[in-house]
Amino acid sequence: MPSVRPLRGLGCVVAILVWLAMPFRVAAVDPIIGTPIPDEPLGTSMDLPASGGISFDLDGDGVRELITLGEAADARGLTGVRAWWVDANGAATQSNEIHVRRAASVDELLTGRGAAGIDRDEMIAVRTSEPSRLFTARRGGEDVPLVAAIGTPSDAPVPCCLTIWQIVSAGGHAIELRQVADTRQLGQQLMPADFDGDGTDEIFVNEGPIDPGDGQTPLTMEASILRWNGERFTRRTLQIGSLAACCPAPRDVGDTDGFPGEEVIVVGSDTDGSAAMVRVSVRDGEPVVETADIGQVDTARVLDLAQGPGIVTSDGFSGMYLWSWARDQQPVQEATRITGGAPLAVFGTGERTRLMIGTPGSVASILVLPGDLGGGAGPSVIFGRDLRAGAFAGGELGTQPLFSGLVPDGLPGMPDAFYYSGTIVQPVADPDALADSTPGPLLIGVQPLGRVGPDGSWEALLGNYTDQGFFQPFVPLYVDLQMVAAAGQLRLVGVGDLTSIEVNGGNLEPTFYGAAPDPETSRYGLIVGDEAVVAEIHGPPGTTVNWQSRGTGGDDVIGPSGSIQLQLLEPAGPDAPNGSGATAQIWAVTPGGHAYSGTWRIRVFREPPDLSVAAPDGVIQLNQTISGRTDPGVAVTVNGAPAFVDARGSFSAPVTAGILPTEFRVVATDPVGNVSVRVVTLVWPLDYRKLPFVPLAVVITIIAGAFLYLRKPDTGPRRQAPDDDATFEEIGG
């Protein structure tokens, strides 16, 4: 049997060589423990997605219900209407679902036969891909909820007919639809307006461009005014000529001429390519169209100022203008302001009129009109970019406008308010008080639909993200266009939770694996060795997470587990240069709309830590101390035992020396595994290596010579002392 000793020796040699060849790195980096996104325990998700909704007191008990429009539960692809009742505990009970349908015969509607009910066999379903919308209008002096939809007959290649129904309570938790109008044409926009000033709204319908049929660009748009006569709608059509009707839209409603009744402002391009503003009014029951060529118009808002009605327009670039427009005359420019943005909202009337201008997610101004608009001395309040909102506006979600719009029913005990870029603005009369407007949540990706439940204690929200977890394009409330067709998630959130701002300023604090805090930068800097960088985010289920890092990114949703992991950086290869890395950004939006974000600079760090070791001064003590200095945050071991390291990097470790020379291996390891090694050899009771050998040899030689000299024996003849009693002869010998 061959000897195993050579094999053992060879194995030891190989092991030593392998150990020497290995880089000085540890196996894993200690995680950076983060802070979870606060839970939203009072949120209640509905079981069906929706594309729109309103809050309305259907049964007249003083408590508003929630009416939703979305995909039908029992007929996929069809539009359905539901109502939700919310009790004091926030439990939502849903009504029956009704499919939105239209009459097959327009004559039934115009003769009134369709108002009382239509044979189900003569009805066709409206598919969710076609525009549908919920809104309210005043009927008989009271607000009533309406739903409008564009139907597509089975034998028609394109939509043809806009139909309007009134939603009524059928007793208990049940609803019915009563058809009240059919325009026969494709309606593109709807706007309620009290044209005749009798307290009952009419409905202005943009039917769209009229095709000249010769291949030319349409120059005329057709519109309808639907008027409720107590039993049914009557329809009056009108044509708006000299307007290139590629994209005209009604912009605002209000009194602009000083006469009883409201007008609708329509903005579009004139036939020669210039911009035009059109005013539609009703006089003696007949529609009247007035066109003004006032230059580029992007947005318009009607104002009720102390000196009379006015219109504020924006050209979409840098100009904002105040106009007065008397009946049968051209508009007169009253004031101009060179400023970016567009009119977002109007607060108050008369001397209390306040106009908010700006762009979603950036900068807003509150103007006290008309002085501010004309550059006068009137005070204005400027809202700079919200720091929390800026993180979203500058990143992947920058294309998703921060929520801007009126808060339905206002805040508890307050009038209607305006959410803008993380601020709840109160429409108070005192302009100085606007500077103290309450900071509010960012509400990114959600649209408040209205207060529901007892005392309005719950806010109904429509999230603009689907169950697949990605954001959908969002139309802010101040843009009065049709609702987006993409379905989102419905959720009930306590009013107190909704109006509370994000904790910790909205800063996202994930748990990081594979990285350590960068000692040379702020709290948002990370260093990494060879490991992948993974961020783990804890938050409410349903929270949407978007991220970007080194040109890549993605989106996901936190599931029932309450957490999600994102790999922000792959493991750095051996050739990755020191200092290379990436900037990682993460955005998280809870189902209730609260937004959290963070940006981190991650760099590869492969420099060994500084390490200096001081040998003990005493050379005869049995118990000695090895001390030295390294970088702050570095761990030090001496022969595998941890040493004490203070905040400045100074360390010390007690050791025990032996009679024979003993090596002590001092290892300094930084948080990402970079290592520095020093070796110290000690011996007890005397470390001869520290003695001064040459001087010591001289001293020893001198001492030895003196000792030997003093100790040398006398080898010469001995001399005797004379004896006093001896005779001379004896002495002489």
Image (cartoon, helix red, strand yellow):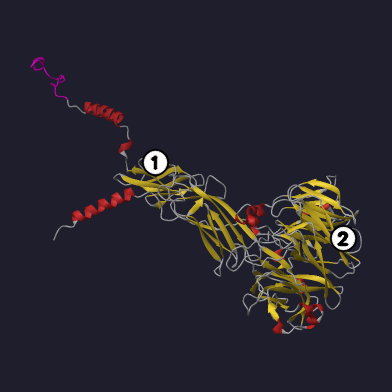
Which residue occupies the foreground of this view, 226 or 437? 226
In this rendering, would 353 be left or right of 678?
Answer: right
Question: Label 1 crowding class (10 Å Cα cut-off): few <14, some 14-19, many 20+?
Answer: few
* Left or right relative to 311: residue 46: left
Left or right of residue 19, residue 310 in this image: right
Q: Position of residue 710 (x, y in %)?
A: 23, 27
Task: Classify mark 2: helix, strand or loop.
Answer: loop
Q: Position of residue 606 (x, y in %)?
A: 44, 46
Q: Measured along the vertical axis of the image, is residue 574 above or below residue 150?
A: above
For marks 1 and 2, give the CA distance. 93 Å
Please name the amino acid that badge 1 sits on: Pro
| Residue located at (88% from left, 69% from top) | 199
Q: In front: 497, or 404?
A: 404
> Quick check: is 355 in the magenta stretch?
no
Query: Which range is magenta?
Result: 714-733
Number of dots carrying numbers: 2
> What residue sits 29% from the left and 32% below the top?
693
The answer, for residue 522, to whether it is visible in the render is yes
The residue carrying mark 2 is 255
Give the number of the mark in front: 1 or 2.
Answer: 2
Report the residue marked by disc 1: 616
Is residue 732 found inside the magenta-colored segment of the image?
yes
Question: Can residue 33 be seen from the camera position used here?
Answer: no
Report the amino acid beneath label 2: Asp
Question: Which residue is located at x 39 percent, y 46 percent?
Answer: 666
Q: Quadrant of the C terminus?
A: top left
Q: Nearer the viewer, residue 644 or 276?
A: 276
**Earlier sequence position, callout 1 versus callout 2:** 2
Q: Dividing the picture into quarters, in which one does residue 71 lie?
A: bottom right
Residue 558 placement (x, y as % from top left): 56, 66
Residue 615 on image: x %, y %: 39, 40
